[in-house]
Image (cartoon, coloured by chain):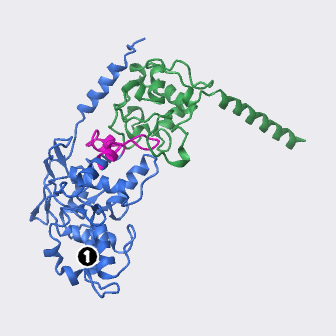
Chain colours: A green, B blue
Amino acid sequence: MEIRFLSCAVFVCSAAYFTFAQADTAPGDVEINAISIDKPLTDVAGDPANGKKIFINRKQGNCLACHANSDMKDQLFHGEVGPSLDGAGTRWQEDHLRTILVNAKAVFGDQTVMPGFYSLEVGADVRKDLIGKTILQAQDIEDLVAYLSTLK
Amino acid sequence: MHFTNNKTLFTLIGIALCVTASATPVDEVLVIDEELEMTTRVQAVEGHPISEIYSGWHYRTPETRALEADSFANPGMLGVEQGEEIWHTVEGSEGKSCASCHDDAAVSMKGVGANYPKWDEKTQRPKNIEAQINSCRVENMGAEPYKFDKGGQKPLTAYIKNQSLGMPVELDLSEGEMQSWWEKGKETYYLRTGQLNLSCASCHEQNHGKHIRADHLSQGNVNGFPTYRLKQNKLISLHNRFRGCIRDTRAEFPDAFSDVLMGLEVYTTWRGTGLSVETPAVRQ
């Protein structure tokens, strides 16, 4: 009985997760007004602690590859390709940060080298297993927005 | 709202950031074995988007730079020595070695590596050193062609290019259809690829001199290939590096010696016009 109850609970949880995933705004449906994305991409509030991890992780955001950030002085190498993100939370509003992360070209123009992390506007010959996929997931973007907003 | 909803403003800021990009190659001179002064910085050839070009040597650590300055310490020289052995080794049905026809490489190959790729009438495409070696093997030696990066391809290419050490890179784009291959290569250079949506230019033209995490971005000049890469502990061919860079943009990458990469070899070699041949260069 206990086992049956447990599997039921797991089923309910995964169903709930599925519903959440469905509520995420798909990359092609994100509405950008000038340089703003007003509506969060998911129903779950961004988690700044997880955002910080994504910022560092080479297989996720790897933001540190191009941007220095004094909030993580324990990390050895900080990039210089983009501007330092010290004070990013003061310089930018959340809706702007969200746009920059989703598709930086919408804010900085086509010449920027910053990838669009939740965009299907990608380069030529995308690796076959990545076709139709974005670099980050909707919730990752929200977590990063939450983290960057703490950089005052 | 703190910011004006004016995309142009941000575009302008973006352009301003690009223009003020500060290149920080070290201000030093590469002298090999205290006798051969190398040209590692030179005014760019006409039509080049960067005014002064630098060898990747300027972007490496003092330790790495010192390795290249001493041919005894340069680990790539082991490959060159291996190439010298191959030069004298008889292979194939005709009983010939490279030396059977070309004799002393120090004389016959001097300058060759500085002027390749060259136009090849027979195949109607540019021919690099690797392709020239394979033609010789098949047509003159009766031997099997080397597969990409296999057999003696890298060491023999390094040996041949090393005979031009210190000589300035210069291509003849007036031969055959070299100019149209240059054009194709230029398109490839500026083509953004992969999920990360980056071109060669994104890093090596717009951002050279800056760090991308631990790596110091160079101008991507190819005058030192095959290059000894400390990261991989071996000689790395130019087409291997092309493929690695394209792969890192999360794209499918072209075959070695394909039309796309031959065009890119012509174009990137041209961008390094005037730099000394450094083969085997030492990089991180």
View extreme (right): residue = A1
Q: Residue furthest top?
A: B1
Residue drawn at x 40%, y 29% is A105
- Image coordinates of residue A87 in percent, x first then y, are 38, 24
Spot occupied by residue B48 in the image (x, y as percentages of width and height)? 19, 43
Residue B182 image offset from top left, x and y in percent = 26, 50
Examine the structure image and report whether residue B212 is included in the region drawn in magenta.
Answer: yes
Q: Quadrant of residue B193?
A: top left
Query: Left or right of A137: which side holds B46?
Result: left
Q: Residue B241 at x, y = what percent?
A: 35, 56
Residue shown at 56%/35% (left/top)? A137
Amino acid tagged 1:
Glu
Instruction: Judge whether B90 appears above or below A148 on screen.
Output: below
Q: Is residue B210 above or below residue B4?
A: below
Q: Is residue A42 above or below residue B26?
A: above
Q: Nearer the viewer, residue B51 or B101?
A: B101
Give the extent of the magenta segment: B185-213
Label 1 element class: helix
In the picture of the structure, the residue carrying the numbered disc 1 is: B81
Q: Is residue B46 magenta?
A: no
Q: Quadrant of the N terminus of chain B?
A: top left
Q: Chain of mark 1?
A: B
